[in-house]
Image (spheres, helix red, strand yellow):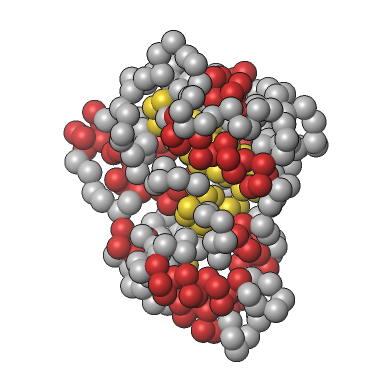
Amino acid sequence: MLIALCSVKGSPGVTTLTVALAMTWPHAESTRRLVAEVDPSGGDLAMRFGLATTPGLVSLAAAARRTRDPAVVWDHTQALPGGARALVAPPGGTHASAALSTLATAPDGPLLPAVARDTGVVVFADCGRVDPGSPAEAIARCAGALVLVTGAQGDDLAHAAARLGELARWTPRPGLLLTGEGYPTVDVERELGVPAIGRLPHDPVAAATLAGHRQSLARRRGNNGGLARHAAALARTLAEPAAPAGPPFVSTAAGVPGVPAQQLRQPGGVIIAPGHGPHSSFPASTPPQVSDPRRNGHQPSAAGKEPFA
């Protein structure tokens, strides 16, 4: 299974979420989990977890010139806490982008989707910000599920609205995931004309832990925003087989904590539907009209903060 995660603006915590999903994936003991940094701007995992930059994405690109055996991917991974493996990208965008271009333009397609087709394997592709023409697009287009991560402030949503239809055509299971404080989920869904698969909280303590930083016990107890719990619920949702295509606003009983059940949608079927709803209704100058845009219904505003990374 290949799950691609991406953003279209800023840094809403795609890498943090990717690691969180790998660490909380159901039946992890019987699943080979691979976090692949395919962000053309470069990677963060080596620095976060004290890993070497090689083996990794660059060495895999070199090896891919000699062999097309998907198993070679595992030879270029390193261990993450919790048993997952990481395909790390160098911190510099020049080398990362060049390696991605090599992998993406292989005659028989990228290796990562082939690895993800193996039974008992889940590949989490951190695509970073997918600007038009990104070399990560070739991998994202092969994903069984694509999660677009966006903040819930007006400018974030304006950029997301401009790309929704395009990204939806890349995968059979697209999903919109909101992060942090901002407009209420129900208002975002109404204005964009699409449902959200969930909303993750601003949780700097958990984010720091997922970034490899140790936290004091007192700080962990006093500042738990529930990111790990939310990520685990989202992982369970993504692990379920794709639901049959149907009306995009059908509620589900399996909830993501912090999101009312009527606002949660399964990522199967039509989630971000091209041409469905007013995709152009979020120009930067006219965000959703709500009584208090500083609140999302669950938490006070922290406008300007990184939502959870």
Can you say whether 31 is above or below 100 in the image?
above
Q: Quadrant of the C terminus?
A: top left
Where does residue 260 sit, x and y in percent of width and height?
A: 55, 19
Name the residue nearer the viewer: 163 or 237.
163
- The image quadrant that residue 168 belongs to is top right
**Residue at x 63%, y 85% (from the top left corner):** 67
The residue at the point 42 percent across, 38 percent down is 228
On screen, 165 above or below 1? Answer: above
Does residue 186 appear left or right of residue 58 in this picture?
right
Task: State the residue at coordinates (33%, 20%).
Answer: 300
- Relative to 136, say whether 188 is above or below: above
* Picture coordinates of residue 46, whole percent (x, y): 34, 65
* Quadrant holding the N terminus: bottom right
Extreme residue toward the top, this view: 291
Which of these two is toward me, 162 or 187?
162
The residue at the point 26 percent across, 51 percent down is: 213
Total marks placed? 0
Q: Residue furthest front?
A: 285
Q: Position of residue 82 (x, y in %)?
A: 42, 54
- Answer left or right for 299 relative to 129: left
* Front in this rendered view, residue 234 or 59: 59
Q: Relative to 265, is 29 on the left or the right?
A: left
Can residue 230 be seen here? The reply is no
Q: For residue 202, what is the image quadrant?
A: top left
Report x, y in % for residue 278: 65, 28
In this rendering, does residue 155 appear at all?
yes
